[in-house]
Image: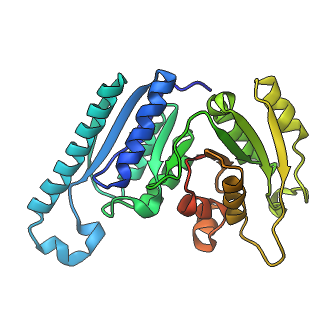
Amino acid sequence: MSLNDILVYVDGTEAARRRMDFAVALAKEHGAHLLGIAFAPTALLPLYGADVGFADMTEVLASVKAQGESALGDLKARAASAGVSTEARLIEGMSEEFPGDFACEARHVDIAVLGQPRDGDPLLGQYALVERCLFASGRPVMIVPAEPAKLSLNGTIVAAWDGSAQAARAFNDALAFLKQAGRVVLLIAGQPDPEAGGESEPRADGMVAHLKRHGVQAETLRVKPGEGESDIGRLLLGEAKALDADMIVMGAFHHSRVRQFILGGVTLTMLEQATIPLFMAH
């Protein structure tokens, strides 16, 4: 998959600046067109409760809209400085509708760049934004940490392999990154999914051969949780750090969304705790 157009969500937070820098650098690297989208709510009732409906929130809404427009202007300036083709769009509406609207826009690009949910604009449900983009866009997402340990496009990539359909999809969607990486490590740390009849230790030789046919030389590394350790997400993050990785590629949400959000899971751990860009596909 080549990258010809990229979508990035921008807001008025400090975290958005790193995200914009990453998106601009990514677009420049691939000669891609960059689309920036910001959100301005037309009402605050769903966010702050019924009492807000009796207050005049005109000034607050105008301020939020101005922040979105300012963030888009900042993106355009950064893109122009880098010689990147760009356009900016402000979407106005209800907060609960925006994640779906954003996912629809993401269908028209190759990848969407988002921030970590915990560091997003409080006016918008950031977890819902990531979830809807993964499930409803048909496109992968790149999660950029608010304070990334490093931002490199050509370094080491750790690809989490557990034999699942989601991981296979993520690997193919990430080929543009895997091909230019200096090193690709297939990190095998997944637990078998009993619902899918998974093996106790997923085989990797077939995927290694597949990647090789695409010009990607991948090495494998099997890791197992220590005694009493059950959080695979933290294990993956620890191994990625030990490998001095610049990016993690993984499939997202192996079970139903409701089950994952209630019980947690690898996806949520990675979303909340990754300190390097996280490429995810479902």
- Relative placement, left or right, of 150 versus 247 is left
- Nearer to us in this view, 23 or 97: 23
Q: Position of residue 29 (x, y in %)?
A: 50, 26
Look at the image and tell me whether residue 108 can be seen: no
Residue 140 position within the rendered picture, expressed as x and y whole percent measured from the top left: 57, 41
Residue at 41% in and 61% down: 119
Relative to 152, say whether 161 is above or below.
Answer: below
Answer with left or right where residue 90 lies relative to residue 237: left
Residue 110 makes an appearance in the image: yes
Examine the rendered structure and indicate whether residue 192 appears above or below residue 81: below
| Residue 36 percent coordinates (x, y) | 34, 37
Q: Quadrant of residue 21?
A: top left
Q: Which residue is at a point 65% across and 47% down the rendered structure image?
A: 245
Give the residue drawn at x 30%, y 45%.
38
Quadrant including the N terminus: top right
Q: Position of residue 90 (x, y in %)?
A: 26, 41
Q: Is residue 34 left or right of residue 256?
A: left
Location of residue 69 by image quarter: top left
